[in-house]
Each structure stands twice: as structure tokens, then as C-alpha cells.
Image: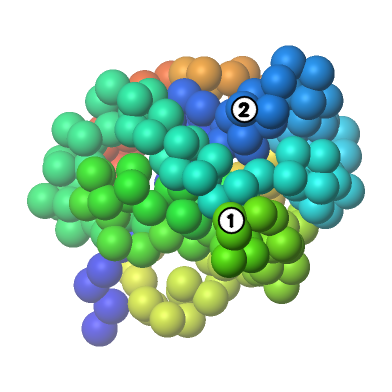
Amino acid sequence: MPTENLLLIDCDSTLSALEGIDELGRLKGPEIFRRVEAMTNDAMEGRLAVEAVFGRRLEIIQPRAEDLREVGRRYLETIEPTAVAMLDHVRREGWTPIIVSGGFRDAIRPLADHLGIAQVEAVDLRFAPDGSYLDYDRDFPTTRSGGKPEVVATLRRRHQPRRIVMVGDGVSDLETKPVVDLFVGFGRYVQRARVAKEADHMISSLAELPPLLARRDRS
């Protein structure tokens, strides 16, 4: 019998205040940052498909391997202030947290390790031996619209959980609503109108999450 509950959490603007791709752009100067940030907002608000901007932003930035390490450090400096306590609580209640992100695995991994999250579903970047950018994993689901529901389906097959809850700030997260048991919108750092309208619940602090999970367990 399934006994596990999965808590799927977005990384950018949820577990951390940052958008990792925008931070990569920031490292390249204000003009590139402005261009990348505008594209990110269009995708996260649902005005553009994720696949319309995913590769283009990386082409503009041309990140280096050391840039991902720097973004990883910035994630650690901007952790959502109630995340650690929330994760400790939900683990005691039988939930397994997994990060599901359209960001980059190598940048997210230090944050995940700090938070004790073993599994990270995110995009791998490829670099040349000298650290220069080559490409990204074009087959990974979160590089395109509708990708996060694909990840959810894979996790459901693999873990066969009793329940799956998704938490995130963007439209790509909201796309999981039909395939999870509860979708919780997160608005601490960015308020997205469609997410606020269509989420099962909206929260502005991860500390608000455990009571929602407990309430659903009792229902």
C-alpha cells in the first residue's frame, strides 16, 4: 500500500527569492539582465510559452560553469525564511519534498543539500572543458510548456504516493493542478494574477503550508 506523500516545490521565487536564470543574466551586465528578466516574466505570467524563451535566454547569456556556482551561492543567501522549519515539520508528518524546477540542477543542488532535499528535477546544462556554455538538456520536460505535469506523472509512477501536492509561483507550476491532489500558489516574492485566481490556495509564507496539508489529511 502506498504510504508516501510527495511535496513538490518550485525553486525560484519559492524556496529562494531569486530567479536563477535572471541572476545568470545579471552577472553579464544590466542590459542582458533586463532582456532576460522581461522574457522570464512573460513566460511565468503565461504570455509566452516556456520553450519560446528557454533556449533564447541561454544563448543571450552564454553562462559559464562558474556562473552556475555563483548562482548556487546566491540561492543559499536568499532562502525563504520559513523553509527550513516547514520542511522539518512536513517530513515528520510523512511528506517527502522534491524540487521540481525549470532552473538548473547544478545551481540548485547546493540549496537542496542545505535543505536536506535529496531529489531535484531540474535542467542540466552542458559546458566545454574550459567552462564555456555548450547547450542544455533539450529533452528535459521543464524546458517546455506542459513539462511539469510530465514530471509529476513520472514521479507518480515511480513513487506511487498516496498524495501529491505542488507549490509554486508561476504558470508552469499551475499547469500541474489537474494532475496533483492540491496546488498551492506562492506569492511571497512575486504575485501572478492567474496563479492567484486559479490556485486551490494562495500562501505568502511557506510556514502556512503545514496546516493546509494537515487539513487535507483530515478531510
Residue 86 at what x, y percent from top left? 23, 35
Q: Residue at x 62, y 35 (%)?
A: 24
Residue 39 seen in the figure: yes
Mark 1, residue position: 131
Q: Position of residue 145 (x, y in %)?
A: 77, 55
Q: CA distance from mark 2 to mark 1?
A: 15 Å
Query: Exactly how many numbered labels are in the figure?
Result: 2
Depicted 72 relative to depicted 125: above or below: above
Which of the two labelled residues, at mark 2 and mark 1, occupies the earlier sequence position?
2
Q: Is residue 157 left or right of residue 172?
A: left
**Residue ID at (26%, 51%):** 113
Residue 150 falls left or right of residue 155: right
Q: Which of the two residues, 136 or 66, is positioned nearer the viewer here?
A: 66
In the rendered view, would you say 52 is above or below 147?
above
Q: Quadrant of the N terminus?
A: bottom left
Work out whether residue 215 or residue 81 is closer to the camera in this orientation and state it.
Answer: 81
Q: Given this view, does label 2 or label 1 mark the residue nearer the observer?
A: 1
> Mark 1: which amino acid?
Gly
Residue shown at 26%/68% (left/top)?
4
Q: Examine the rendering and report whether any part of residue 142 can be seen.
A: no
Residue identified by numbered label 2: 27
Colour scheme in use:
rainbow
Q: Position of residue 212 (x, y in %)?
A: 33, 36
Callout 1: helix, strand or loop?
A: loop
Q: Residue at x 56, y 72 (%)?
A: 153
* Left or right side of 56 for 58: left
| Horizontal relation, residue 30 to residue 5: left or right | right
Element at badge 2?
A: loop
Q: Amino acid at mark 2?
A: Leu
61 is higher (above) or lower (below) than 206: below
